[in-house]
Image (cartoon, coloured by chain):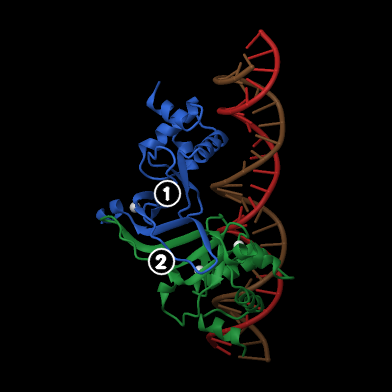
Chain colours: A blue, B green, C red, D brown
Amino acid sequence: MGDIELVLKEHHIRPTAIRLLMYKFLSERDIAVTLNDIESGFDKSERTTLYRTIKTFEKKGLVHQIDDGTGIAKYALDEKGTGENQSQDLHLHFHCEKCNETICLTDHKIPHISLPKGFVSKDMNLVIKGICDKCSEKK
Amino acid sequence: MGDIELVLKEHHIRPTAIRLLMYKFLSERDIAVTLNDIESGFDKSERTTLYRTIKTFEKKGLVHQIDDGTGIAKYALDEKGTGENQSQDLHLHFHCEKCNETICLTDHKIPHISLPKGFVSKDMNLVIKGICDKCSEKK
DNA sequence: AAAAACATGCAACTTAAGTGCATTATTTCT
DNA sequence: AGAAATAATGCACTTAAGTTGCATGTTTTT
Ligand SMILES: [Mn+2]
Ligand SMILES: [Mn+2]
Ligand SMILES: [Zn+2]
Ligand SMILES: [Zn+2]
């Protein structure tokens, strides 16, 4: 049984052909991808199926959705959090205004913020926009 | 000459009827509003005109757009920054999962974040999701 | 093997956002 | 003031992401 197949099963996702392919696709890139990116990454592609597949991944905690301010949802594999650590999704995201790529800075956690009385924090999203390393060295 | 008229002129926005009304509308609420909110706030309303009006306000620095993760753009008046202080847009936003309202926490600035080598920060967006003061006291 | 549960494909719908263009209002120029 | 230029408004239409319904195909369970 393949490696990916195991990962899916661990997350209670049935390892169908498309799911294996999508996982492979995601694991091969280090930037967050849109549904369109995924769609154009496959020869055989059915928008809806890909959509439902990524949503399944998300629900089962394999992937997190990223809202980088472009108005288009992006997705990236969760870190190999073997299970329960949900604090992993509190890392920040960087969106490059030049190449339009969005990347997870997984070891840059969002600092603690104190809120006014009465406000209860459940989740946070921090996106930094600017120029990424690749684009800034290109000069 | 009215108060609002002056504010608009200071921002080089011609004070037409609709613009005066929209400014008044925005200044009367302390939460960020969607274009739909604005539209339903007027008897006479032309989506496109309201859309272009809010975009004009945004371009001229009267209003800032807020991306709270709902996928729908919201807008709020800038603080009475009498001119150049653009650091004002680095406050954080709170989105209540219960009442769905989004509010500017204008005096909660986004803390400084150090980035990996090569990354240049130009802008930031921090949204905290949870339960707002009104909803949490309502119990 | 039959029944139940789940995945896939295709079409259609929803909604926010944005554009083109004709009309109307305001400002500027002579 | 009147004409010309510029800007605002209204209406129709387009775009694109996201989402759902339903029929068909596949896998799992009993
Ligand atoms: Mn991430
Ligand atoms: Mn704000
Ligand atoms: Zn870049
Ligand atoms: Zn609330």
D27 left or right, relative to B109: right
Quadrant (top left, top right, bottom left, bottom right) of the C terminus of chain B = bottom right
Quadrant (top left, top right, bottom left, bottom right) of the N terminus of chain B = bottom right
Query: Image quarter for residue D21?
Result: top right
Picture layout, residue A36 above or below residue A109: above
The residue under the point 52% across, 63% down is B94
Q: Is mark 2 within 8 Å of ligand 2?
A: no
- Choose between A63 and A24: the one closer to the eye: A63
State which chain disc 1 sits on.
A
Q: State whether discs 1 and 2 lie on one chain.
A: no
Picture layout, residue A8 above or below residue B83: above
State which chain disc 2 sits on.
B
Q: Is residue A43 visible?
A: no
Q: Is residue B86 visible?
A: yes
Residue on which the image places disc 2: B110
Instruction: Judge depth for marks 1 and 2 and give the one in front.
Output: 1
The amino acid type, in three-letter code, at marker 1 is Ser
Measured as percent of width and height from the top left, residue B19 is found at: 62, 76
Label 2 residue SS: loop
Residue on which the image places disc 1: A87
Measured as percent of width and height from the top left, residue A91 is found at: 39, 52
Check contact, mark 1 vs mark 2: CB within 8 A: no
Measured as percent of width and height from the top left, residue B130 is found at: 54, 58
The amino acid type, in three-letter code, at marker 2 is Ile
Measured as percent of width and height from the top left, residue B88 is found at: 44, 73
Q: CA distance from mark 1 to mark 2?
A: 20 Å
Label 1 residue SS: helix
